[in-house]
Amino acid sequence: MYKLEEPIYFYFFVIIPVIIAAFLLVLWWKKRTQKKFANPELLAKLAPNASTFKAIVKLVFFLFGLSFLILSLVNPKMGTKLKTFKREGVDVVFALDVSKSMLAEDIAPNRLEKAKQIISKIIDNLGSDRVGIIIYAGNAYPLLPITTDHAAAKMFLQNANPDMVSSQGTAINEALNLAKTYYNNDEQTNRFLIVISDGEDHQEETKQIAENFGDEGIKMYTIGVGTEKGQRIPIKLNGSLIGYKKDSKGETVITRRNPTILQEIAEASNGAYIDGNKTNTPVDAINSIIANAQKSEFETTQFSDYKDQFQWFIGIGLLFLILDVFLFDKKTKWVNKTNLFNDRKTK
């Protein structure tokens, strides 16, 4: 396991394309000026050892050296030991609806991105609580097992999209059953499942499953995104709108939020329904619920005793810079004699 101590220094890599652009500009200027001074055959006689290839090699060495020195500033660290820590917190599992209807843009930027914003902000306010993420549409899939690594949770969350699910629909029952496998302590009572969806096409039998959640001490909170007025489902290619989803009759599909079913399944598990169209409303509500919940102690393993690795990058970087210094711009004599590219005419 590794971590980066100062990732802000990655911004220094913008120097690389600037140097390459400057090198190409100078090379072009030299060629242009030389053509004004004399023809190519005369220049070859006046400067027989000039080598554009060697200049490029020197630049490559210099850029490699510079890159490794920048990486040394970032200071990658390697974890050398796994340690077990005891923490207190709750288990929070998010079930995110990624069906096509979540792409509707009746709330900005669209329902799915709004749902991601809500989850991300809730995670930001979690302490030592564990978090897991499930995505579902026609099927349910585990996006992230339950973990204390909140940064990883947010990274996986940003990649969630409808294309990750093989079939469309709203298989919330599968998502609920999958969520049960995330909780590994049957005696723990502070377990939460947060379902974020537009509520469209959810099955009626979901209420029975939700009641079972309540009996097992798992509280389910549902967050609805979208408007009751509804909106068309855009179809995009490479970010450009190419049309809207149509049904089998060729009619444009209008997707609407259905808060009723979301309210029913939340209440069946002794939870609550929360309107999610304003980000702060569900974020504040969920964070307040979790903050006031009784915490349970659990064990988690993490890498510790991270050791600096910057010295390796400094060494490699200096090696490339030394090679750059000792590499001359002129053609190497033995290469020049071999005439590898047959660029000298024989008489």
Image (spheres, grey):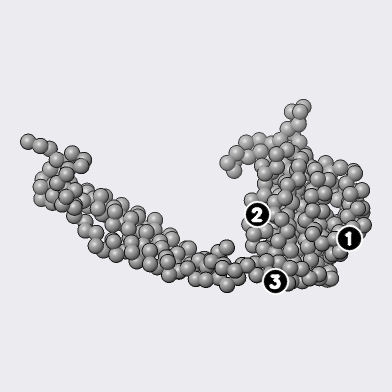
Quarter placement of the C terminus: top left
Q: In the displayed structure, would residue 215 be above or below residue 229?
A: below
Q: Quick one: label 3, few (<14), some, or many (20+) residues within 10 Å?
A: few
Residue assigned mark 1: 217
What residue lies at 56% left-to-right and 68% top-to-bottom?
Answer: 80
Looking at the rendered structure, the kind of residue marked 2 is Phe
Q: Is residue 347 left or right of residue 81?
A: left
Q: Mark 3 or mark 2, which is nearer the start of the sequence?
A: 3
Q: Mark 3 or mark 1, which is nearer the start of the sequence?
A: 3
Query: Which disc, if any, is residue 94?
Result: none
Element type at mark 1: loop
Q: Quick one: label 2, few (<14), some, or many (20+) residues within 10 Å?
A: few
Residue 156 is situated, as x and y percent measured from the top left of the image, at 65, 54
Q: Is residue 329 left or right of residue 167?
A: left
Q: Is residue 279 left or right of residue 262?
A: left
Alpha carbons under labels 2 and 1: distance apart: 27 Å
Alpha carbons under labels 1 and 3: distance apart: 26 Å
Q: In the displayed structure, would residue 308 be above or below residue 41?
A: below
Residue assigned mark 2: 156
Q: Quick one: label 1, few (<14), some, or many (20+) residues within 10 Å?
A: some
| Tally of numbered discs | 3
- Tell whether label 3 touches label 1 (CB within 8 Å): no
Residue 106 visible in the displayed image: no
- Tell whether label 3 touches label 2 (CB within 8 Å): no
Residue assigned mark 3: 85
